[in-house]
């Protein structure tokens, strides 16, 4: 099969490995069944007499996601950080310069930098990371939003029609998010990612808001959250643990890297939450965690465990020790505090 041509006229993308073939091995059990369900759902659109507009929306979204998954599949083993911020800030602005430094520091640590591929903060993140470590997810607007010169023509640049598919990729593919000052879009993206984590619709990852020195953009945002949301009972105190506000690039980088110091990743296995760690916890720390975080356990107790049989489809993670718990699925702020405790004290 020939790789499809790109919309910007650049060379077609040829992945390092074909994600569908998975290194020429059969797909994981159940994948073919899920694909069949997609086909059956598409057939039902005919039965439902769906309008052309609805079908076109579904068709375009599916094409955008399939192609984007194919692009990201080649870089699945790389940690990534998504950078949000205004497209209107120029190279002389302190926040632009901070975003350049942040991208540079994250790339040096092995992280790829995902941005919306336009100008301003998005360009700055790519300037810092460099072309090889940059990924762009551009949005097609009625007024043309061209990609920045760092990522233009690169095989890691995607052009999407819909904001919802773009926003899904920003979150699904990242291991952390950094927000610099911006407008409606930046605030929308910040609140959406907090909502997804707070409600358990996304995996846990660090979120850092970066002010330029002497600026109060995110400090004032934080005051609003605490005064209007927390003090009025709209969120819980632990929810404020889901993000960090700083005016230091070094602190922002440390927040990203420190989150994965001991904690590695999480997944649910038949309803139980499994936290994969880079090292075994000491007996004293484990017993303290078991006592201090008993409030987030729906039944039973937190236990240390070996990989579960259902995790065999991730062979590269089988050597990692685990914590296992029947998480209440509500206390995501407290779960973040648990991860912070492990990273700080293990």
Image (cartoon, helix red, strand yellow):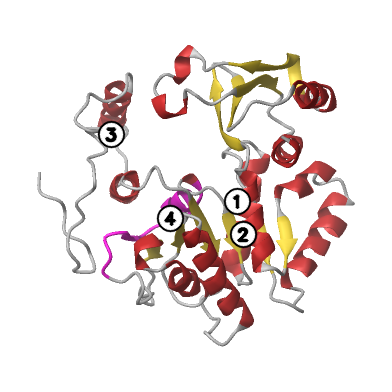
Marks 2 and 1 sit apart, C-alpha to C-alpha, by 6 Å
Residue 304 magenta-highlighted: no
Q: The N terminus appears in which quarter of the rendering?
A: top left
- Residue lying farthest to the bottom in this orientation: 92
Say whether marks 2 and 1 touch (CB < 8 Å): yes
Q: Give me the C-alpha separation between circle 3 and circle 4.
A: 22 Å
Q: For the residue labelled by badge 3, is the local secondary structure a helix, a strand or a loop?
A: helix
Which residue is denoted by mark 3 in the rendering?
Answer: 42
In the image, taking residue 225 as reference, residue 103 lies left or right, namely left
Q: Nearer the viewer, mark 3 or mark 4?
A: 4
Residue at numbered disc 4: 166
Q: Disc 4 or 2, which lies upstream in sequence?
A: 4
Q: Residue furthest left?
A: 1
Secondary structure under tag 1 reads helix
Label 3–label 2 contact, CB within 8 A: no
Q: Which residues are magenta?
A: 153-171
Residue carrying label 2: 253
Question: Which mark's residue is nearer the viewer, 1 or 3?
Answer: 1
Q: Residue 34: x and y, percent?
A: 33, 25
Residue 257's label in the rendered image is 1
Q: Residue at x 49, y 74 (%)?
A: 124
Residue sitting at x 28%, y 65%: 154
């Amino acid at each position: 099969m020939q790789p499809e041509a790109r919309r910007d006229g650049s060379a077609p993308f040829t992945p390092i490995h074909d994600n569908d073939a998975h290194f020429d091995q059969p797909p994981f059990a159940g994948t073919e069944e899920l694909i069949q369900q997609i086909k059956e759902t598409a057939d039902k659109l005919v039965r439902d007499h769906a309008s052309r507009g609805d079908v076109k929306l579904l068709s375009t979204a599916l094409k955008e996601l399939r192609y984007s998954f194919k692009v990201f599949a080649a870089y699945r083993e790389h940690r990534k950080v998504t950078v949000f911020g205004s497209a209107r800030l120029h190279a002389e602005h302190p926040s632009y310069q901070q975003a350049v430094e942040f991208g540079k520091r994250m790339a040096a640590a092995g992280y790829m930098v995902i941005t919306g591929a336009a100008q301003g903060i998005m360009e700055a993140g790519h300037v810092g990371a460099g072309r090889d470590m940059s990924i762009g997810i551009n949005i097609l607007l009625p007024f043309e939003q061209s990609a920045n010169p760092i990522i233009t023509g690169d095989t890691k640049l995607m052009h999407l029609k819909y904001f919802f598919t773009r926003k899904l990729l920003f979150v699904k593919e990242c291991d952390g998010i950094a927000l610099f000052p911006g407008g409606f879009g930046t605030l929308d993206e910040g609140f959406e990612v907090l909502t997804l984590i707070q409600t358990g619709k996304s995996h846990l990852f660090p979120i850092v808001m970066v002010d330029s020195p002497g600026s109060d953009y995110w400090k004032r945002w934080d005051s609003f959250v605490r005064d209007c949301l927390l003090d009025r009972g709209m969120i819980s105190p632990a929810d404020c643990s889901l993000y960090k506000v700083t005016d230091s690039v070094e602190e922002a980088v440390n927040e990203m890297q420190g989150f994965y110091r001991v904690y590695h990743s999480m997944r649910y296995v038949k309803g139980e939450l499994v936290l994969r760690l880079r090292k075994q916890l000491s007996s004293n720390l484990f017993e303290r965690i078991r006592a201090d975080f008993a409030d987030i356990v729906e039944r039973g107790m937190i236990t240390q465990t070996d990989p579960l049989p259902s995790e065999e489809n991730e062979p590269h993670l089988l050597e990692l020790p685990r914590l296992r718990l029947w998480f209440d699925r509500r206390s995501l702020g407290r779960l973040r505090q648990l991860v912070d405790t492990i990273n700080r004290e293990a």
